[in-house]
Amino acid sequence: MLQLKRLSIKIRRILEKPQYFFLLVSALSGFLLIFILPPYQAPDEHTHFYKSVQQSYGHIKAEKFSETEVGSMLPAKYNQSVAYYKYMWLDPTQKINPGVVKEQLLHGPNDSARVITKYENTAVYPPLTYIPQTIGLSIARVFHSSVLIQLYAARIATLLAWLVLTFFAIKIIPFGKWAMVALAITPLTLMLSASSSNDAVTFGLIFLWTSFCLKVINDKKPLLIQERNLLIVFSVILGLLKPPYFLLILLTILIPRHKFKGLKQSVLLKSIVITVPLITAILWMLFTRNLYIVTNPLADTPLQISYILSNLHGVSIDFLNTFFISPVSDDLVLQFYGLYSWLVIRIPIIFVVVAYISLFLVMTVRNPFEATINNLTTKIRIWLVVLYVLSCFAIIGLIFLSFNPVGQNEVIGLNSRYFIPLAVLFIPALSGLINLKNKSSYITLLKWIKPSLILLSIVTIVSIYLRFHIAN
């Protein structure tokens, strides 16, 4: 009995550390969602899965079959597997058939004849963020597993990568650790981490990059050789993520001059770190330039650019309206914590409100138990907010240029998941703005915050379960 009590105390102390709290909640929620979320139901999961399958066969570049078809020649069984579950897409009345899932787990389609498998929206993405999924499904295929088992293996690999990357991001960030936890435990991140999408890996890498940059910027000690090398390695990684996130490389500009041996070293390293991902991204774009196609016949990028330049003020207002009050995008602010537009699920508004309050509090209230204090100046904090706005506009603008009819006053195709990794910039921007009188007040705050995050994860699991497993 005494040993159990000691073990309970030890576990409680471990969970007081934000990175372990995240690990426990996200691991339990993620592994449940892997099997509760039916196959191919996450946003574009089937095309992400096709991309991973292609890489597992040793190819990193897709093929262009026609002006509207880009993909690979893959065994027909992958297309056939996806076809079983298309009936649930965007139709809340449709539920999963457990008998079909069981049959496909054990047997499933096994047609090995190569057919054109299209995945235009993921074909041009660099291979980096698909490595975990590729490894997972490749291991499953070694044992001659069914397509569905390969999918679940890819999901498990994605979740493990997400857990590892975010665990170290929370551990490394010098302040605002609980704010990072609150960003990592949202309905969208939980769902994406349990899918074979590349979004969770992308988020984890950006969280880790931002945490590392904040550690370097906030630390008063001179820059170590290992830190300089890591900055360069990370810069290559950023060049292999989705293009709009490239702007986060500008965090290196904020590294103080006293961290370097002199102005020359500072300018040289920052130039390298900013240039390397740009070159990496350009090289990949050149490598895949023949894969880009027009998915909307009404879209015309050159004409759209002319329209933007001639109506800059109006377009800016349209972008802001889209972000906050868009009926087409179904309210991106609400999506962030409460809406799965792809799954046709809405988290009850009370939980959304509680989640936003929790996030605001852990972002702004200084944690008296953190050894490192936010030393960032007001100028740097403002620059971080500006960088967030610029990155958001880059995402909205890229979608507007690529997929929207010329002159349209609203951006179609946005989803709040694109903005989740950018929200981490508000942690250094807002951290420590509110100081509580004593440590006990902060302990009381955490006693409210942690259960709310656990409750949000439970509500997420229950909402997805009800959507796909319980008849109306």
Image: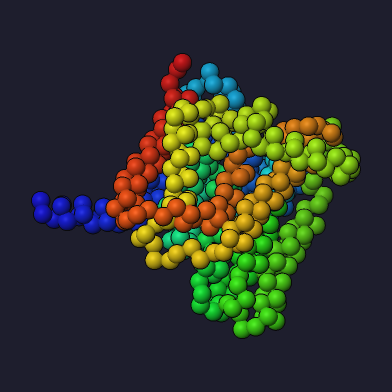
The color scheme shown is rainbow
Q: Is residue 415 visible?
A: yes
Farthest-out residue, front: 437
Is residue 166 at all visible to an observer of this figure? no
Examine the rendered structure and indicate whether residue 94 appears above or below residue 312: above
How far across and down, in percent of the image, does residue 156 sit? 47, 47
Q: Farthest residue toward the left? A: 1
* Residue 311 place in picture, x, y as percent: 85, 40
Camera-nearest residue between 94 and 22 = 22
Where's residue 201, x and y in %? 55, 51
Relative side of 29 to 379, left or right:
left
Residue 196 on image: x %, y %: 55, 44
**Residue pushed farthest bottom?**
261
Residue at the spot 68% in from the left edge and 71% down from the top edge: 270
Residue at 84%, 33% (x, y): give it: 407
**Residue found at x 47% / y 51%:** 364
Q: Nearer the viewer, residue 274 or 88?
A: 274
Q: Is residue 314 above or below residue 240?
A: above
Near-viewer residue (148 or 8): 8
Placement of 178 over or under 90, stated as above or below? below
Residue at coordinates 32% horizontally, 50% vertically from top-left?
441
**In the picture shown, does residue 194 fall above or below 363?**
above
**Apparent side of residue 60 relative to residue 190 in the rendered image (left or right):** right
- Residue 456 or 466: which is nearer the viewer? 456
- The number of numbered badges drawn on the structure is 0
